[in-house]
Image (cartoon, rainbow, N blue to C red):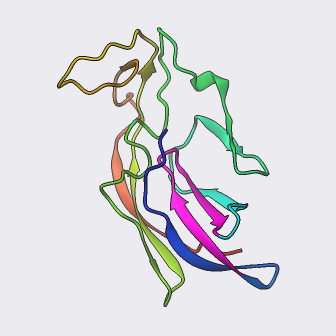
């Protein structure tokens, strides 16, 4: 998934010391906090309720992909979050230095992704493959508002 969301400038404490950081909610369902002076990963957290394509983040902040959710021609599993991501760029998050909280509009949705030949047709969304069904029998899309403290 792409990471095109605005990064929020925040100041966090690490081991009792202030660190100039940036926080970003990625479409992949994880929120990342990085040291903005050197790019070092400080911490990450799942911010969506529904996230199944990854088994968590490693010590460098990289998602540990669950191979079960690699798209195939016969895809039956629903990948969460879906193609719009846990947060979409048109809905901006905010940070308040007064409350020291991030305020994040979250999208909870899942999608079947099917492996297929990529074909570009002007005027039609280009997926580079093929989206399948948008919801399973036990799935429903909804949104919520998250308050998150990007500190240790």
Q: Is residue 14 left or right of residue 114?
A: right
Quarter of the image where the C terminus is located: bottom right
Could you tell whether 132 is left or right of 101 in the image?
left
Residue at (52% x, 13% y) in the render: 72
Outermost residue toward the bottom? Answer: 98
The magenta stretch spans residue 35: yes
Rendering coords of residue 66 (x, y %): 66, 30
Question: Does 24 lie within the magenta span?
Answer: yes
Residue extending furthest toward the front: 37
Q: In the displayed orientation, state which residue is furthest to the right.
A: 15
Q: Image height check: is 85 above or below 122? A: below
The picture quadrant where one finds residue 143 is bottom left
List x then y, in percent, for residue 120: 29, 17
Instruction: List x then y, in percent, for residue 19.
Output: 70, 78
Residue at (26% x, 27% y) in the render: 125
- At horizontal 52% and vertical 19% (from top left) the residue drawn is 71
Q: What is the tally of numbered marks visible in this picture?
A: 0
Instruction: Point out the stretch of residues depicted in magenta.
Output: 19-36
In this view, the residue in front, 138 or 37, is: 37
On the image, the x and y values in percent for residue 114 come to: 44, 17
Image: 31 above or below 118: below
The residue lying at 55 percent from left, 43 percent from top is: 51
Which SS does the magenta portion mostly show? strand
């Amino acid at each position: 998934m792409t990471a095109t969301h605005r990064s929020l400038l925040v100041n966090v404490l690490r081991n009792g010391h202030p660190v100039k950081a940036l926080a970003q909610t990625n479409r992949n369902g994880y929120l990342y906090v990085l040291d903005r002076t050197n790019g070092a990963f400080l911490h990450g957290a799942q911010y969506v309720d529904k996230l199944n394509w990854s088994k968590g983040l490693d010590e460098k902040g990289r998602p540990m992909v669950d191979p079960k959710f690699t798209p195939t021609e016969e895809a039956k599993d629903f990948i969460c979050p879906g193609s719009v991501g846990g947060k979409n760029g048109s809905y901006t998050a905010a940070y308040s230095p007064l409350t020291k909280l991030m305020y994040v509009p979250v999208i909870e949705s899942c999608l079947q992704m099917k492996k297929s030949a990529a074909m570009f047709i002007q005027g039609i969304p280009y997926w580079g493959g093929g989206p399948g069904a948008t919801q399973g029998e036990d799935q429903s899309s909804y949104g919520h508002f998250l308050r998150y403290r990007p500190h240790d």
